[in-house]
Image (tube, rainbow, N blue to C red):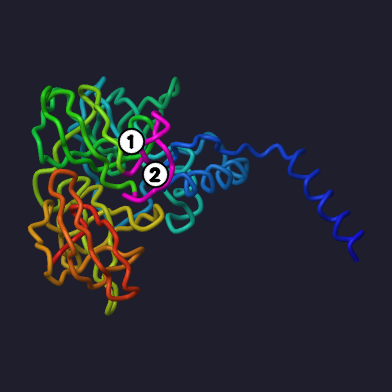
Amino acid sequence: MKKILLIVSICAMFLIACSKTETNGNSTANANSAVNSTKNTATAQATPTIDPNTQATFPFKDFPSVDTSAKAGEVVLVPSYNWLQEATVKGADKVTMIWYSQKMSAPDKEMSEVEFMSDKKKVPNAYIVPIPAGQKAKNGDIVLTWWQSGSGMNRAIVVDDANPAEPVVRYLDIDYDNPAKSSDGKTTIGQMDEKLKPNTFVKINAPFDVGSMVAVQDGADQKPAQVIRVAGDKVFVNGFAGKIAVIEKSRCTPFPLVSNAKAGEKVKAVWVNSLKEGTVTKVDPKIGRVFIKFDVDGKEKAVSFGEVMK
């Protein structure tokens, strides 16, 4: 029996060593890196079944056509184009999305040309998150950007506004207790501060602004989602694990952008893919975190501003 187990182990090691699947060795990968890795692998396997000339269209017919405020040359956040093609061919429920930084090439009605690395593609405007040039921010502002030493759209809170055009931020969409180390090899990525480049962020000012969070009524439950675009009574959102959807605005309750919760108060907050009740143990407004002891498991968790409501 031991010989059989030994042979099986050796064969498994051999297959792993010979595999052509790439793995992510970056120790600073954020909480989305597992999703990124899975999506990249799935995309690589699925893409050959899709004609590369397939034009990406918006997969939700009940969402009206929209324009864009992005200008040529400005940064925009858009999912990878092959995922947009997959959503067109296979359906939105078969694809997960992460928004990455790209460049607007030629804005237009309904569809705009976006520069993906050196390739330019027409993208439905509903997918495009504009990042207007010339933005400034002050301490405590919540901004939408991307993890600039990693990847992927992220909300962040400004912790140093010595240069308002290049503020230092703490990212809010990376778990506070994520153990991965930042580039200094010491600070964990959920507790790192980073200086943003100019023209790479936009302030989130109000509920239902792009990047803000909402609680979506789903039967008796509420589920968190991030606003990508609002059109009339419809909201295009990015939900748990990158699942996109269009929902009625009436089903959405916006989270306060900044929490005014106090220690000892009962609140509802994001817990995995739902809202759960808990008791606030402390609040750190500088870094935009509310520490909550959740009723469901009795454990304390640091929840970001924009994901807590009373």
Crowding at mark 2 (Cα within 10 Å: few <14, some 14-19, many 20+): many
Q: CA distance from mark 2 to mark 1?
A: 12 Å
Mark identifier at residue 147:
1
Quarter that holds the N terminus: bottom right
Q: Please tell me which residue lies in front, 133 or 160.
A: 160
The answer to whether residue 86 is above or below residue 162 is below
Q: Is residue 186 magenta?
A: yes
- Measured as percent of width and height from the top left, residue 24 is found at 55, 38
Q: Which residue is mark 2?
A: 98
Left or right of 292? Residue 36 is right
Residue at (11%, 24%) from the top-left corner? 162
User: Any mark on residue 35, and which?
Assistant: none
Q: Main secondary structure of the magenta part?
A: loop
Q: Which residue occupies 54% across, 48% down?
A: 38
In percent of width and height, residue 37 lies at 53, 44
- What amino acid is at disc 2? Ile
Mark in front: 2 vs 1: 1
Q: In the picture provided, is 287 more to the left or to the right than 147?
A: left
| Amino acid bearing label 1 | Trp
- Furthest residue toward bottom: 220
- Number of other residues with Cα within 10 Å of mark 1, as a class: few under 14, some 14 to 19, many 20 or more: many
Look at 22% across and 43% down and name the residue there: 66
Asked if the magenta segment contains residue 179, the reply would be yes
Magenta stretch, residue numbers: 175-190
Q: Earlier in the sequence, mark 2 or mark 1?
A: 2
Query: Considering the image in quadrants, where does the C terminus appear?
Result: bottom left
**Image coords of residue 75 (percent x, y):** 27, 27
Kindly indicate the quadrant of the structure image that contains residue 134: top left
SS assignment at label 2 = loop
Q: Is residue 40 above or below residue 9?
A: above
Q: Secondary structure at mark 1?
A: loop
